[in-house]
Amino acid sequence: MEKTPRRAPWHEEEEQGEVGIWKYAFGFSEMAVLKCAIELGIAEAIESHGSCPMTLSELSSALGCAPSALFRIMRFLVHRGMFKEELTAQGSLGYAETPLTRRLMKHGEYSMAALILLESSPVMLAPWHSLSASCVLANESSPFDVAHGEDLWRFAAANPGHSQLIDEAMACIARSTVRLMVQGCPEVFDGLSSLVDVGGGNGTTLQKLVKACPGIRGINFDLPHVVSVAEEFTGVEHVGGNLFKSVPKADAALLMSVLHDWGDDDCIDILKKCREAIPVDKGKVIIVEAVIEEGDQTDKLTDLRLGLDMIMMAHTTAGKERTLKEWGFVLGKAGFSRYTVKPLPAMPSVIEAFP
Ligand SMILES: C[S@@+](CC[C@H](N)C(=O)[O-])C[C@H]1O[C@@H](n2cnc3c(N)ncnc32)[C@H](O)[C@@H]1O
């Protein structure tokens, strides 16, 4: 009997490299096709069709799309698990929802559509073209500044449409992070009668938190152009201001996805302002941010956290994701005496810092 020849290990490595590099070369296509699916409203159409799978011709007529183009988009999305194919009662092939489908819907508790639309917007894609230039010594400008001539927050203040996109994208992340915090470490909010969310965006975080912990009075603090258009929520007061000047007083200050937008010096200043806003004896600052693993990187979320760090590099002036040692450094410099870290089953951890 003829034996199948064994392939040399170098051959397998080469094959892996070949597949790997093509995946990187086409990496942008996943984001682009998801954006296309969100804009067309594919998830909403399939959901509203009910429990019966939706055939290509039903989906094309519901969306007003050419069947041949839609077939190729759906083949890509099915391959990546966004939808699945199932037989209809009549025996035709149709499209049905998967757990990922609801992430593509524009609304709802699990929607991540706004985040995908933000990151794939021309404004956020443009800075990536200057990433290498910004790494060159003596080039002080951040990629966002090179692309747009000002930093992200000034740009957002002058462009209400982009500001809204940022607020909605942050609200997507906030909804899932608050759910995980309330389930995983509810004790963080025990005994608080007031909480100021510093750089709280449109107030979604506090809306969810005060609903879960009705004893808390929420103060949503952000730049005036952000809070002036924020929806009103029961139990949440919107306050406009600048976190580098002063922060409204409360039992605790929350900083979620804010400190990673800034370099160490700014970060220390923000932490000092938060420290001034809380009682010295029983106050605390609750930081919800990624902690980058050092050494052997075994956590499967490390890949995402390092990706987030690249986003900070492209979109902020000096922002970055921090290791535990780097968190310890900025907290120490801001005068905090101790801190604890509670990991979440997600990108961020909860760091409680005490005066
Ligand atoms: C990445 S977003 C995080 C929003 C929110 N914490 C969340 O997680 O959904 C950062 C927020 O910081 C706000 N911000 C930036 N500079 C600020 C400043 N100088 N004073 C107050 N807020 C500021 C932005 O407007 C934005 O809402």
Image (cartoon, grey):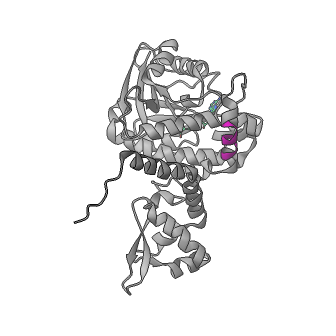
Instruction: Identify the residue at the far bottom of this view.
Output: 90
Q: Is residue 175 magenta?
A: no
Residue for point 66% across, 45% down: 124
Q: Quadrant of the C terminus?
A: top left
Could you tell me if residue 350 is visible in this image?
A: yes
Chief SS of the magenta region: helix
Residue lying furthest front in this view? 1
Q: Return the x and y of residue 70 as percentages of the image width and height.
A: 57, 73
Q: Nearer the viewer, residue 282 or 273?
A: 273
- x, y percent for residue 340: 37, 23
Q: Is residue 325 above or below residue 233?
A: above
Measured from the top left, where is residue 227 in percent x and y? Answer: 63, 40
Identify which residue, 223 or 262, lies in the foreground: 262
Residue located 63% across and 27% down the image? 318
Q: Is residue 128 magenta?
A: yes
Residue at (59% x, 34% y) in the render: 312
Left or right for 136, reference 42: right
Query: How many numbered badges does the structure rendering display?
Result: 0
User: Magenta segment range?
Assistant: 125-131
